[in-house]
Amino acid sequence: MFWAAHFLAGLAVVLAWPAPVALSRASWPTRAPFTAMILWQVIALAGGLSMIGAMLVWGLDPLGDNLVEAVGRLGDMVFANQPAYTLGLMHVFALSAAGLLGAHLIFTLLLTYAKIRGQRKRHRDMLNLLSSPAENRPATLVINHPTPVAYCLPGGARSVTVLSDGLLDLLTAAELDAVLMHERAHLHQRHHLLLWAFAAWRAALPWLPTTQLAQRAVNELIEMLADDEALKRVSEPVLARAIAIVASGSLPDPYAACPPEDPVTAIALTPGAPGGQDTGATVNRIRRLLAPQPPLSVLEQALALGTSGLLLGAPTLLLIAPWVLG
């Protein structure tokens, strides 16, 4: 449908620029990080569906009154060598672009997964050489280094939390519990999958500035979600001090031109470690703990979640309903 293609194209533009910019500048996500995380995921998914769907709907429009008929005729053209005279040049271009973009997104997702998996394997190999198990703390490793370091390394049943001697010397027992609860929350809530998805989105569309905004916002939100889990065991001041101590050990960018010579520092700089932490995000987390704001009301939560449902449902319905109903 011609109108559906244009609506999807317009929605793709909104989700590619103004919507992410507005959400990244909003103050309410710190009051409801889980809801904000859902909205970020919906923006990314609905944006991709809209971009691909706009080209797909336009390309298939001349081939039939419903999705099944249109796809069937396209299959006949491709596999049965039937004439494609009903398709104009622009329709062929739109279908090709939709296929290429979809393949590009899927390929980038898989390639990013392969890269991350390889980095984690190398990281784990280095940890096996340079770390030792923590006493009375299962699935926790300690590296001998004075810099405060704490992070988790996902790996299913082999997932571990990594701490440094320098951090253990600085933390009280309560602060150590806060750090461990925080890092284990990352593992239990599968935050590494979210990081993988948004890293792939940024890698697939590096020319889109909002992919960087989304990745930064998601990184901050997952830290807040882990903070909320840690607050079930410790108080806000204790967690805030633990965050400040860990942040004091933030190391240079892992993609810097000059890699560190110290192998332990090299471990801390690999993906999953705290290297290159966003100072602004750390300040926001501490401010959120020391000057807590009231959570969103039920109405505000419903509005945010309802917006998420509309954003995700609109491209899905436009891809299906006009074609099924003819």
Image (cartoon, rainbow, N blue to C red):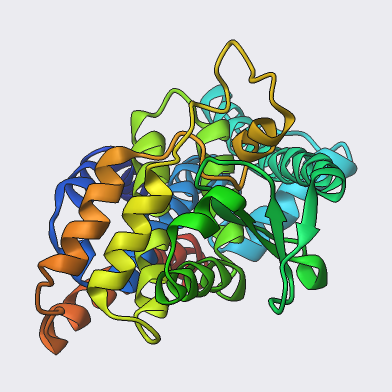
Task: Give the x, y percent position of residue 154.
Answer: 70, 60
**Which corner quadrant of the image does residue 152 belong to?**
bottom right
| Front residue (pair 133, 266) | 133
Residue at 30% x, 49% y is: 282
Left or right: 228 in relation to 53: left
Residue at 53% x, 70% y is: 180
| Front residue (pair 252, 241) | 241
| Front residue (pair 76, 252) | 252
| Front residue (pair 176, 3) | 176
Left or right: 143 in relation to 88: right
Does residue 240 show up?
A: yes
Residue 259's place in the image compared with 314, above or below, is above
Task: Check the image and name the residue furthest to the front.
Answer: 169
Left or right: 92 in relation to 236: right
Task: Give the x, y percent position of residue 277.
Answer: 41, 40
Does residue 86 show up?
A: no
Task: Check the image and name the residue furthest to the top.
Answer: 257
Left or right: 144 in relation to 275: right
**Which corner quadrant of the image does residue 237 belong to?**
bottom left
Task: Give the x, y percent position of residue 308.
Answer: 31, 69
Residue 16's place in the image compared with 241, above or below, is above
Residue at 54% x, 66% y is: 183
Residue 146's place in the image compared with 190, above or below, is above
Residue at 45% x, 41% y is: 249
**What is the count of numbered marks?**
0
Residue 89's place in the image compared with 321, above or below, is above
